[in-house]
Image: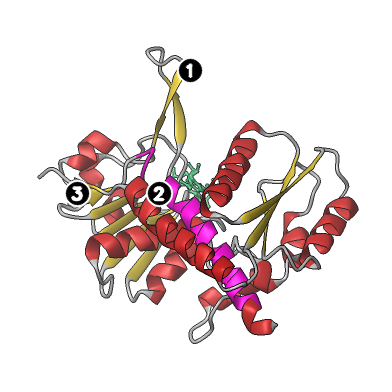
Amino acid sequence: MTAKVIDGKIAAAELKGSIKKAVAARKTKGLAVPGLATVLVGEDPASQSYVKAKHRACEALGIASFKVGLPADTTQEKLEATVEGLAADDTVHGILVQLPLPKGLDAERVLNMIPLTKDVDGFHPVNIGRLAQKGREPAFTPCTPSGIIYLLKKTMGSLEGKNAVVIGRSNIVGMPVSLLLVRENATVTICHSRTQNLQAIAKKADILVAAIGRPEMVRGDWIKPGAVVIDVGVNRVEDASKKRGYRLVGDVAFDEALEIASAITPVPGGVGPMTIAMLMQNTLRAAQMMDQVF
Ligand code: NAP
């Protein structure tokens, strides 16, 4: 079997196209232009490039964006005052504090200060708590996990009753995607660094999500024939043949998986593009929620 390659770039472009239309329609109707503010503390190159990509996406879709950059030695008080200012600004519908924060800053305190209705990253503890509770609705769900569910439903239709195995339990990916899969009525097993017999558990999955951060750890013989594999990992491995000296690989050995799975996301070009598209969707939603307030 050669697996279908799930093209996240195409899916993200489709989604962004519909967001762009919705933003333009708001402008025609005289409704507020959705606005996203990013807060970046320090100069971590990866974080800088993520923030840059988010602003580029805003620009392309007609969403207003506000960039706040703070030095790495910013105090907790200054950071909290910045978030407080954005929380009070009516032109800002979504606030995103780029994580990880430099050592010494308390991310949880900062995330707690973002109003639930502006929490477009979906990381506010109350939004995550609601995600975990039956019958409760979070204002927003985290972007990478939502992008994963979008790709899975596009590929498989209903996820109901499927056996899903998620490797990774981080606050950003593993845990929220597991909660979203439960909401889709999948049966979910969450694995982590202390899981025993990981390969045997993975091999039972109809849906295998790898969010580990270990290059090509999941091998072909970990995969159930016909499974749908979502590779979230983004890892640099040295590659002298590349100009920049490295290439990006996922957490799954892609070529091996291609022979066994029915569908798989590539790295890059799979989950990554969906993350930003979902952020744009959440920002539009934040503006729509504000319409109902005024
Ligand atoms: P993380 O916070 O480091 O979490 C990694 C998880 O993997 C942890 O739960 C850890 O278990 C588990 N793990 C580590 N080694 C393991 C092992 N040998 N066996 C089983 N489980 C193991 O990472 P993350 O933030 O979730 O990110 C995971 C990957 O996704 C990274 O490569 C990251 O770059 C990528 N990512 C991509 C996007 C995107 O948009 N494409 C977005 C976010 C992240 P413990 O909990 O026991 O430590």
User: Going from the N terminus, do you reach mark 3 or mark 1 first?
Assistant: 1
Q: Is residue 241 visible?
A: yes
**SS under mark 1:** loop
Circle number at residue 271: 2
Q: Which residue is mark 3?
A: 261
Question: Within 10 Å of the Cα at label 1, are there few (<14), some (14-19), or many (20+) other Cα atoms?
Answer: few
In three-dimensional space, the C-alpha distance between marks 2 and 3, rounded to whole angstroms, equals 17 Å
| In the displayed structure image, the side of residue 131 where residue 207 appears, left or right | left
Q: Is mark 3 within 8 Å of ligand 1?
A: no
**Residue shown at the point (66%, 52%) measured from the top left:** 65
Q: Which residue is mark 1?
A: 244
Q: Based on the displayed image, in which of its 4 quarters is residue 216 positioned?
A: top left
| Magenta residues (range) | 267-290
Total number of numbered labels? Answer: 3
In three-dimensional space, the C-alpha distance between marks 3 and 1, rounded to whole angstroms, equals 31 Å
Amino acid at the residue labelled 2: Val
Amino acid at the residue labelled 1: Arg
**Residue shown at the point (48%, 59%) measured from the top left:** 20
Q: Is mark 2 within 8 Å of ligand 1?
A: yes
User: Does residue 59 lie above or below 30 as drawn?
Assistant: above
Q: Based on the displayed image, in which of its 4 quarters is residue 92 positioned?
A: bottom right
In three-dimensional space, the C-alpha distance between marks 1 and 2, rounded to whole angstroms, equals 23 Å
